[in-house]
Image (cartoon, helix red, strand yellow):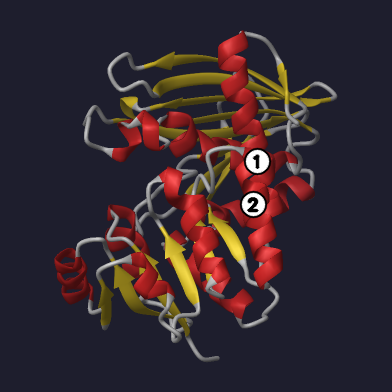
Amino acid sequence: MDPVKWGVLSTAKIARERVIPSMQKSPLCRVHAIASRDLEKANLIGDSLGIDKRYGNYEQLLNDPEIEAIYNPLPNHLHVPWSIHAANAGKHVLCEKPISLNANEVGHLIRARDTNKVLIEEAFMPRHHPQWKRVRTLLQEGAVGEIRAVQAAFSYHNINPSDVRNQSDIGGGGLYDIGSYCIALTRFVFDQTPLRVTTTMDVDSSFGVDRLSSAILDFGEGRHSTLICGTQMARHQGFVIVGTKNWIRINCPFAMPDDWKATIDIGENTFPGASVAKSEIFPESDQYLLQSQNFAAKIRNEEKEDYPLEDALENMKVIDALFRAAQTAKWEPVT
């Protein structure tokens, strides 16, 4: 299989430190070009990462006929417009999360995808990690019985006013940045979208972005998920699934170093409810590598895991409802 030639829109930190180096490990991917509004910066990053072509604006990169796929790690408010520009140029698009600022915008992406007959996908790398595939298998085998509750938490500490995550006018805030992971993987576990949600949200008075959200997602039939996401707290991540017969704990569910051996714990279901019957340890895995390889293989028409824009749409519906609930202090339907 010939490698897919990629172009990268911007020299964002996530691109230069994680995604591009991971793509470069794969025989299915070739990072062909990078673009920045500052050509000097594009040249600097291109030199450091060994990228052949560098462009001083995004339009030039999209006009490069050799590029087949675009990775879009631009600030959140630019995800939709530049992904549409890329699709209109005939490029496939792997776009960072959140793929949009609201569910309505995803509809524009779906139309661009269908009109141009390209692939557009939201980049949630944990879904490609072997531990999550194993969790899904365990749940399908009835390891916890009927799933009743999920607890998801993700936090870090960031009070840098120049960080895009702390800028309200370009889509900053914890719910977009890390709450989206909690929502996506909770939906992954329940294999559906919640019916209604409610939340309490603390907004930073200086930045104007949400810095702590505590939410309940109601999946119906007595099944709930609680999530906490915070951007001015200690670093923490965790995910617990509790069923009628047992529980599973994913110790590092979202973001991990490439040399980290992921571990999931399966409960013993005995008093006091904290004993581990079995732990499963997974080999070191590069989630970004697996994500880009999966997308490249689909471009080459191989049967791979599929997370279409319709899945991203469901995630954004939940985020929209949570923002409404923060304003109304009521349960809000996910529509």
Residue extending furthest toward the bottom:
2
Residues 315 and 79: in front is 79
Q: Is residue 36 above or below residue 244?
A: below
Which amino acid does the dot numbered 1 rest on?
Answer: Asn
What residue is at 41 percent from the left and 47 percent from the top? 255
What residue is at 43 percent from the left and 49 percent from the top? 78
* Alpha carbon separation for disc pair 2 and 1: 7 Å
Q: Position of residue 125 (x, y in %)?
A: 50, 55
> Label for residue 95?
none
Q: Which residue is mark 2?
A: 108
- Mark 1 lies on a secondary structure that is helix
Q: Quadrant of the N terminus?
A: bottom right
Q: Quadrant of the C terminus?
A: top right
What residue is at 67 percent from the left and 81 percent from the top? 301
Side of 323 where 79 appears, left or right:
left
When asked about the image quadrant of residue 29, the answer is bottom left
Residues 41 and 141: in front is 41
Q: Which residue is mark 1?
A: 104
